[in-house]
Amino acid sequence: MSLYFIQEDMMKKAVLTLACVATLAATACNRPLTDQEKTIVGGVAGIGAGLLTANAIGANKNWTVISSLAGAAAGIMVARNYQTNQCAYSNGDGTYRTAPCPV
């Protein structure tokens, strides 16, 4: 096994470990999450989803990075309130707007 594949495998394990630790740390809170914490959790969850999807379809290193970044972008863009069926969309400057969630 070449050094390249060993480093790539170590990077994937490090990213997955970080994603798991951050998600577990955020869910361990006994109080409602702030908007900033929700954004972080959404981003980390998106990274994890993108990474897992890329690995599931056997994507190469470049597509794995792109799918992880796309997952992070999607994760921080949307938060859903299931009680009111309203979604919060990030404006990119730290503020949010709400609108009905897509069906």
Image: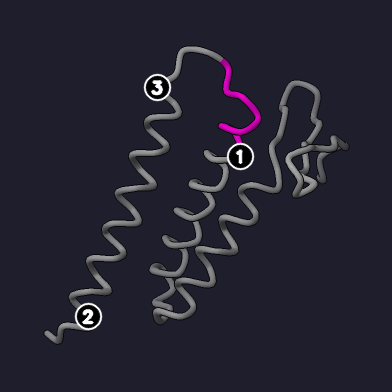
Q: Secondary structure at mark 2?
A: helix
Magenta stretch encompasses residue 57: no
Which is more N-terminal, label 1 or label 3? 3
Question: In the image, which disc is placed on residue 95?
Answer: none
Left or right for 12, reference 75:
left
Compared with 57, 41 (above or below) is: above
**Which residue lies at the image location 69% right of the left edge and 37% below the top edge?**
79
Q: Secondary structure at mark 3?
A: loop
Which is more N-terminal, label 2 or label 1? 2
Q: Quadrant of the C terminus?
A: top right
CB under 8 Å between callouts 3 and 1? no
Mark 3 lies on residue:
28
Label 2 packing within 10 angstroms: few (<14), some (14-19), many (20+): few
Given this view, does label 3 or label 1 mark the residue nearer the observer?
A: 1
Give residue 84's position: percent from left, percent from top: 80, 23
Mark 2 lies on residue:
5
**Which residue lies at the image location 28% right of the left edge and 57% below the top edge?**
14
Label 3 packing within 10 angstroms: few (<14), some (14-19), many (20+): few
Q: Secondary structure at mark 1?
A: helix
> What type is the residue that disc 3 sits on?
Ala
Q: CA distance from mark 3 to mark 1?
A: 16 Å
Mark 1 lies on residue:
39
> What type is the residue that disc 1 sits on?
Thr
Which is more N-terminal, label 3 or label 2? 2
Q: CA distance from mark 2 to mark 3?
A: 35 Å
Q: Quadrant of the N terminus?
A: bottom left
Give residue 97's position: percent from left, percent from top: 85, 37
**Which residue lies at the image location 52% right of the left edge and 38% below the top edge?**
41
Q: CA distance from mark 1 to mark 2?
A: 32 Å
> What type is the residue that disc 2 sits on?
Phe
- Write down the region rendered in magenta: 32-38
